[in-house]
Amino acid sequence: MNFASYAPALGLLLIMGLLAWALNWLKKRQAPAGSGQGAELRLVSQLMLGPQQRVVVVEVNGPNGPVQLTLGVTPQHVRTLHTQTLPAPATPSYAAVARALNAAPSQEPSA
């Protein structure tokens, strides 16, 4: 038996191992810390009231649509001050998008 007969198989095995390692590394690198199966959270604004007190407005995508929460934040606790359900963003119909595209003037690239 000759090593040359095993070289293509070993090379393919090495490439597959490196590809698996690279994909795992990219997956760890791309996922932000704390991102799980929970709701999406976005900081809308914050106001400092004192050295350690602030009012924060956050937007959460919950099961019933987006919700805006006004929170009082101190070093000891977080308290909900106000909750507001936001209307879901309207998605345009296919017909509306087609009309808008047809109404837009076409810009031909000049040579």
Image: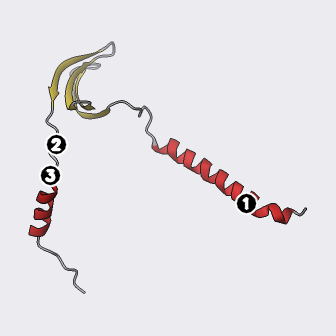
Q: Position of residue 35 (x, y in %)?
A: 41, 34
In percent of the image, x 56 and y 45: which residue is there?
A: 24
For marks 3 and 1 on the same chain, the one whose residue lies earlier in the sequence: 1
In percent of the image, x 29 and y 19: which residue is there?
A: 52
**Disc assigned to residue 42:** none
Residue named by callout 2: 89
In percent of the image, x 45 and y 34: which residue is there?
A: 33
Mark 1 to mark 2 CA distance (whole Å)? 52 Å
Mark 3 to mark 2 CA distance (whole Å)? 10 Å
**Disc assigned to residue 92:** 3
- Outermost residue on the top side: it is 76
Q: Quarter of the image holding residue 80?
A: top left
For marks 1 and 2 on the same chain, the one whose residue lies earlier in the sequence: 1
* Image position of 31 (left or right of 92): right
**Disc assigned to residue 11:** 1
Mark 3 to mark 1 CA distance (whole Å)? 52 Å
Identify which amino acid the numbered label 2 is placed on: Pro
Q: Position of residue 43 (x, y in %)?
A: 26, 33
